[in-house]
Image (cartoon, grey):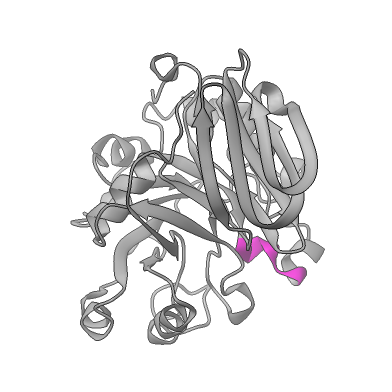
Amino acid sequence: MKSPYAGTGTWIRGSFHGHCDENSACASVPLADSVRDYQALGAGFVTLTDHDLITDLAPLQTQYPELVLLQGFEYSTRENVVFAGPGLPPLYEHSLEEALAQAGDLFTMVCHPQPKGAALEYWTRPKLEALGTWPDGLEVYNGHYGIDSAIASGRQPYYANFWDELLTAGHRLWGFANDDFHDPADFDNAFNMVLVEDMTPAGVVRAAKAGRCYASTGLLLLGFSVEGSLVKVQLSAPCDGRFIGSGGVVLSRSENSLFEYEVGDEQYVRFEGVGDAGRIFLQPMFRDMSAVSRK
């Protein structure tokens, strides 16, 4: 199996899903305030994905030249999908099937795929398979649904089980975690670390589409290696760590900050951890990349 993090680059932090109160009626924080707070946090990129509208980020890019600002939108007239990247056209004017077919080099991501679990059908595997073009990934954790009031109302932040269902069916999708920023309580509840070769919107999108990234709510990856069939993972803090394979089966589990697993004949293997410092979701490694389909 091949490491998804092979090669060189710079790790930068950011979210692919967020809103501002100027252009999303569901949000309560002005765009300038949220970008200021992300910059103070040390984020390397910020994505604005207002509902069926592309927010102009040019004035803020001038104010924060050190930040990579990604234009985006959240396709919202049916089950939601994020589109982001440079030169983003108003694809929300088309059907979702046509928008995905035209997305090309843009980044596309399924949003909060099952926000109320079994209580309400939202995204399902048959619905995704019927689209004709697969998005690049899906949210495995959505921080907007992770705030206490949201959980109390039955909304769920965690979707890794659905990710395993899709991976087991042979579909290659990367996993992402976003704070889905609407309100102050959402801020920095979840983020992605992306290994970029260049600090530009196109560089962030290329890395995300290639799976050169991981999802987190606090835990950080310090080291990852594949030596023959041995996979090693080093994290920033101890946690309950699990190597997971087809069907969501736990292949190995331990409490530590250093984890190892000897890969056998698994279709795919991914690593997930949870501890006092938060969660982490590494991208899956596939045995046969030619056997997985984006269609």
Q: Is residue 271 above or below residue 22?
A: above
Residue range corresponding to the magenta coloring: 143-148
The answer to whether residue 34 is left or right of residue 122 is: left
Rendering quarter of residue 250: top right
Image position, residue 3 (x, y; %): 46, 33
Magenta-drawn stretch, dominant element (helix, strand or loop): helix
- Measuring 49% from the left and 57% from the top, which residue is drawn there? 192
Rendering quarter of residue 204: bottom left
Specify whether residue 285 is in view: yes
The answer to whether residue 166 is left or right of residue 212 is: right
Q: How many marks?
A: 0
Image position, residue 252 (x, y; %): 75, 30
- Measuring 67% from the left and 35% from the top, which residue is drawn there? 260
- Measuring 27% from the left and 42% from the top, which residue is drawn there? 103
Image position, residue 44 (x, y; %): 38, 68
Image position, residue 33 (x, y; %): 44, 87
Quick one: 286 or 127, which is closer to the camera? 286
Specify whether residue 107 is in view: no
* 147 drawn magenta: yes
Question: Which quarter of the figure is the C terminus placed in?
Answer: top left
Quick one: 100 or 259, which is closer to the camera? 259
